[in-house]
Image (cartoon, grey):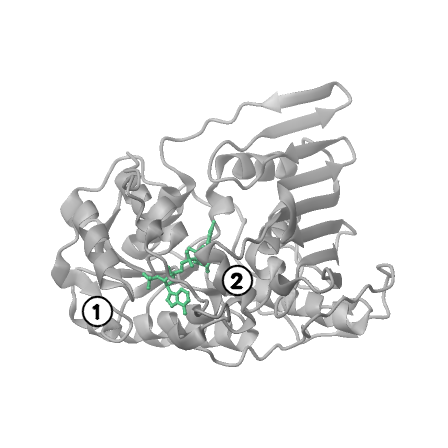
Amino acid sequence: MRVPPEPSSLMEIPMNLFDKDGRLDLSRRLFLRSTGGGLLGSGLGLIGPAFAQGGGGSMPGLPPSRPTGRPFPEMEQETPVEPGRRLGWAVVGLGKFALNQILPSFGESRCSKLVALVSGNRQKAEQVASRYGVDTRDLYDYQTFDRIADNPEVDVVYVILPNALHAEYTVRAFKAGKHVFCEKPMAVTVEECETMISAGREAGRKLMVAYRAQFEPHNVEAIRKVRDGEIGALRLVTSDHGRILDPKDPADQWRMVKSLAGGGSRYDIGIYSLQAARYLTGEEPVEAFGQIANTKDDPRFREVEDRVAFQLRFPSGAVANLSSSYSTASVKRIQAFGEKGSIILDPATEYEGNKLALQTEKGRQEVKVKVKEQSQFAAEMDHFSQSVMNNHDPKTPGEEGLRDILIMQAIYQSACEGRPVSMEATGSTR
Ligand code: NDP
């Protein structure tokens, strides 16, 4: 059962990043480590040459193949675990996504329960705690966060902070002896991802990146159809994710600040297009080519990129044509084209209401997908709780997040250099 947010809307408690003069006020930044990658220059408007075979720059080798998408046991718990045995979760950052999607999803969870909250806003934390039955003794702020180590009720820390804070809170949570479930993108730089993975290993704790689309029934069914050969050999994937970045929305204000967001549309929503290409092909790209475009003089894109068009080439010969945008009307579409037909997911990555169609020589047919009572959010959280309980590797571990950031960085590099960047082929993992 999903518990809807209060009508008084907890989101109305503003966390405005602008000062009284309309300048970005970064005094609330807690962790502004240099983003390292630094390939995106302010106002960069590179339009590169057509995606060409070979002749590209190179990037360091990718980590070992990820487990994502390999034949995966249906671990989702159908029978709820009794409340006393459910894993206790602490949610860090009570923003738009946490308040409107994640906290209500604990009501549908079968083996995870909300036991603690971490927020910089005590008043908001107390309101949320009272709504979800969290004891006020289990409220933390960013300074007292490390005391979570002394709270035996907390098994898992769920990091839902601006992207550049993911690494710090993941590492601190591991130091506190907790398992970590981290929002996408995993972090801003490859180095941060590697630090997070090592911290988990050292602590003997698990790390999973919240790639909800891999738990969304229409996407899962699309992957199954491709694997079962229903559209023949897969040749091409296209995916577009776009929306209007709104400077008036507090949740979009940090997204305009490179030191908090890491990058623009690609880190935020382009990651869905990238993920789609990877989970549909079941392969890792061997070559990436990117083009970045910003609308001149648009203040939203002083620090982060607006539109990105990027192409990937896979070892099988399949190619992907992908995009992300912060200045076009909402689009969340994925298509897979094979020798015998195609699959259309449109919308593909909404929180609910996604649609799947199959196009073959017989015509186009809407595919009715059985949607479980559980949301994709409850499903991914329960999956992680079960991975911890049963000591299994989660479906989307840190290595999966790292791989996306590596590819992202290759796309930046390609856009800056105006030529394709080749990556070491690691072959199919599925
Ligand atoms: P919000 O701005 O709404 O929430 C972020 C929260 O982080 C804030 O409300 C605040 O919570 C806390 N925070 C701590 N320090 C800062 C800071 N310096 N600046 C701003 N906020 C700070 O963003 P979203 O909820 O939209 O996104 C949060 C994360 O979730 C991102 O990584 C995003 O990519 C991911 N996300 C994932 C989605 C998915 O579908 N998987 C969808 C949307 C977002 P408090 O006031 O409690 O301290």
Report the mark closest to the observer, 2 or 1: 2
Q: Regarding ligand 1, which quadrant of the image does it lie in?
A: bottom left
Left or right position of 112 against 135: right
Q: Quadrant of residue 374?
A: top left
Which residue corresponds to the image point at 17% horizontal and 42% vertical from the top-left? 82
Mark 1, other Cα within 10 Å: few <14 / some 14–19 / many ≥20: many
Location of the N terminus by quadrant is: top left
Left or right position of 181 against 331: left
- Residue underneath mark 2: 255
240 relative to 252, above or below: above
Nearer-the-camera pick, 95 or 298: 298
**Residue 130 appears anywhere in the view:** yes
Q: Amino acid at mark 1?
A: Ile
- Residue underneath mark 1: 148
Query: Along the polypeptide, which appears first: circle 2 or circle 1?
Result: 1
Q: Amino acid at mark 2?
A: Arg
